[in-house]
Image: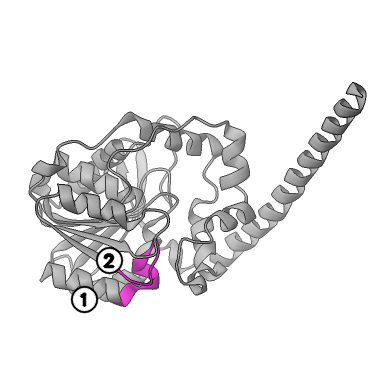
Amino acid sequence: MRRRIIKGLLLLSLLLILAVAIGDLMSDRRKSAIEETYAGGPIDAVNHAYIDGVRIAYREYGDSSNETIVLVHGFLGSSYDFRFLVERLEEDYHIIAPDLPGFGHSTRPNDYAYTASNHAATLHAFMTVMDIDRYHLLGHSMGGRVVLFHATDHPDTVMTLTLVAAAEASQPSRRRLPTLFYRMVFSNYYVQRYAFRNVHHDDAFNDKTYFDPMVYFSGDIPPEILRKMSSHVDLENLDALDTLDVETLILYGEQDSWTPKAIGESYHVVLPSSTLVIIEDSGHMPFIESVDAFHAAFTEFME
């Protein structure tokens, strides 16, 4: 009986290894096709700056004589995420959208601390290199925590703050999972697409047309870097938000299951100079699937 159980477990293990190998092969073929589709195309049009040896890719739009808006993406995102919003803002603003270290076309150093506070420090150093000392800040999801750290550390630089589906101020403790987990989940195209199927409320925006660029920019993040990103969120929490005296727009999608609107409501209670807007029929990325409503709310706030 014991021998049968051992044989059964061995067979199950072999089948699992085979399934993973086949899945990896299919995923690699799909990612190669994505690379061929996008590499060298318009979405690769970025500039570069260097902060402490880290290459920061960034996109820049609009007239530099206008007020500057800095757009900060979320986890597994990139500056390309804001393409639809940029089209509506670039006539009136000077826009800078960096790829945070580890994401997009920026480098992925092994010795970088992938925390929101360190990303915020890098962002401040980046804006110093850009020679811009006052600007509006907009952060999405993880990027919301980044801009909050930036605003609390350097309030004199921030003209207004916009939190879009921002992650919670206090991050829950997470177990440090094996590197193999990150390879199987975040490096596999099909597993990742299944996991991200509900990013948008409207299924039309879950099409590969919107998903594949995300894979192009962040599908090659090494599993060990992803593991560091996950474990580093435990190192910090945002404090004293009730003393942050910056006009703040808090904007969430009604149907966001990743960062529910209750998080936005809690920020609205804590932040003294905040305005809360909930966009109906929108998920985690309202600046994509509800860009007109998003732009209207943002414009009203800025006016």
Secondary structure under badge 2? strand
Kindly report which numbered mark, 2 or 1, lies closer to the viewer in this rendering: 2
Q: State whether residue 208 is above or below residue 246.
A: below
User: 296 or 53, which lies in front?
Assistant: 296
Q: Residue at x 30, y 77 (%)?
A: 292
Q: Can residue 90 be seen from the camera position used here?
A: no
The magenta stretch spans residue 287? yes
Q: Amino acid at mark 2?
A: Ile
Classed neighbour count for the residue bearing mark 1: other residues with Cα under 10 Å, few (<14), some (14–19), many (≥20): few
Please give the residue where the numbered disc 2 appears in the rendered image.
278
Query: Horizontal and vertical percent for residue 217?
Result: 48, 55
Q: Bounds of the magenta span?
A: 279-292
Q: Element at badge 1?
A: loop
Q: Nearer the viewer, residue 41 or 231?
A: 231
Picture quarter containing residue 162? bottom left
In the rendered structure, are the residues bearing label 2 and label 1 in contact, judged by CB atoms less than 8 Å apart? no
Q: Residue at x 49, y 51 (%)?
A: 218
